[in-house]
Image (spheres, grey):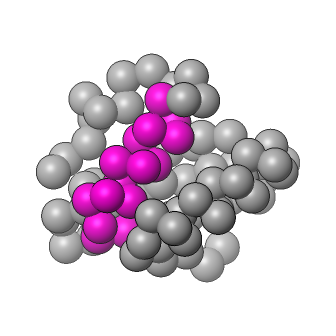
Amino acid sequence: MRPRIIDTVEKWNILAAALKQKNYIFFYLQYGYDCPEGFHAWFIKDEKKVEVITHNKEVQDAIIKFLDDSGVKNVKEGIQG
C-alpha cells in the first residue's frame, strides 16, 4: 500500500468520490495535520487499504466531514491538532 499525499481539498474531493463509488469504508485515523507525521486516514475494502496523508487543515476537515456524512461517530474527539 502506497500512501496518497493529498495537499488540496480538490484532490481530496476526487479521491473521496472514488472511495465512495468503490464502497471503501473508514478504517482508522491517526495524528493531526500539524503533527510532523501529518494527518493519516485509512479506508478499507476486501483487505485492500487506502492510506491518505495530509498536512493541510482544510483537507483534514474535509476528511472529517466526509466521515461525519458517512455516519462515523465522534471523529473529532480523537484528532490531534
Instruction: Tell me: 27 left or right of 78.
Output: right
14 relative to 69, above or below: below
* Residue 13 drawn in magenta: no
72 vs 39: above or below: above
Write the residue at 55% across / 53% down: 42
Asked whether residue 30 is in view, the answer is no
Task: Return the x and y of residue 49 as percentages of the image width and height.
Answer: 68, 58
Is 56 colored magenta in this rendering?
yes
- Residue drawn where x is 83% and y is 51% of the image: 22
Instruction: Please state the extent of the stretch shown in magenta in the rendering.
Output: 54-68
- Please report the residue visible at 42 percent of the width from the left and 49 percent of the height from the top: 62
The spot of residue 14 in percent (x, y) is 64, 64
25 left or right of 26 in image? right
Residue 56 seen in the current view:
yes
Q: Position of residue 38 (x, y in %)?
A: 29, 67
Residue 75 in percent (x, y) is at 37, 31
